[in-house]
Image (cartoon, rainbow, N blue to C red):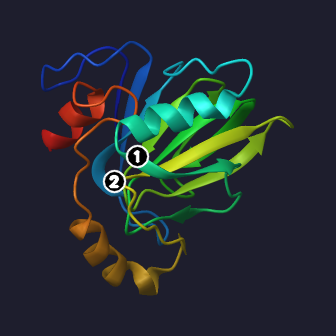
Amino acid sequence: MAQAKGYGDSRGYNVPLGTHTFVFQENSGIPNSMLPLIVRQGAIPPSADDPAKTFETTFARNGWTGAWRNGIYDFHHYHSTAHEVLGIACGSATVRFGGEGGETFGLSTGDVVVIPAGVGHALINASDDLLVVGAYADGRDYDLLREDPNALAAARTRITAVPLPAMDPVDGAQGPLVKLWTSR
């Protein structure tokens, strides 16, 4: 796993403060991706009356649709047909990204995680009030795959066919995703 954290990037693009990126190699039947997982702390301040609505509106405005409200599965899984965004509307959670040997990261209200197709993720623990809003780039249909070394070849084929999104789910065309993913 390679990791770049904080303000700045090796290719000269200054990402917003509180932005962390992680790149994971294949791990325990999880294909992962050469595109970086992007964690943005405090990216969206939720509204008091309907915290999830702020995330849904922001994501949809930037082409990330098919929104849902729930939690995060507590088993390692990934999507081979879509890039996913998760917004923490309420509460906090510890999530492991990249499969069993990946990176564990604490998330709290206002945080946003952009997960490239193929990157594993699993909930480790959460507060009782956790509320997550998820959506998919360009409203793509998603699948739900678990660790399975026998399924990797077919999953890799689907992952490489997933187009790059045109917009960052938070900041649109000027967001870090556009810069970080298109430079790969």
How many numbered marks, from 0 up? 2
Residue at (46, 67) in percent of width and height: 142
Residue 182: give x, y in percent of width and height: 15, 41
The residue at 22%/30% (across/down) is: 173
> Is residue 77 toward the left or the right of residue 138 in the image?
right
117 versus 132 height, above or below: below
Q: Which residue is mark 2?
A: 138
Q: Which one is nearer the viewer's eye here, 126 or 171?
A: 171
Q: What is the x, y in percent for residue 14?
A: 23, 16
x%, y% of residue 159? 30, 68
Q: Quadrant of the C terminus?
A: top left
User: What is the crowding at mark 1: few (fewer than 14 residues within 10 Å), some, or many (at least 20)?
Assistant: many
Q: Nearer the viewer, residue 1 or 166?
A: 166
Q: Quadrant of residue 36?
A: top left
Q: Can the viewer see residue 146?
A: no
As helix, strand or loop, the secondary structure at mark 1 comes to strand
Q: Earlier in the sequence, mark 1 or mark 2?
A: 1
How far, Cα to Cα, is label 1 from label 2?
5 Å
Q: Is residue 163 above or below residue 35?
A: below
Q: Quadrant of residue 183?
A: top left
Tell me, yes or no, whether the two marked residues, 1 and 2, touch with CB atoms within 8 Å. Answer: yes
* Residue at image mark 1: 64
9 with respect to 1 (left or right): left
User: Which amino acid lies under the numbered mark 2 shown in the image of this protein?
Assistant: Asp
Q: Is residue 129 rendered to the left or right of residue 49?
A: right
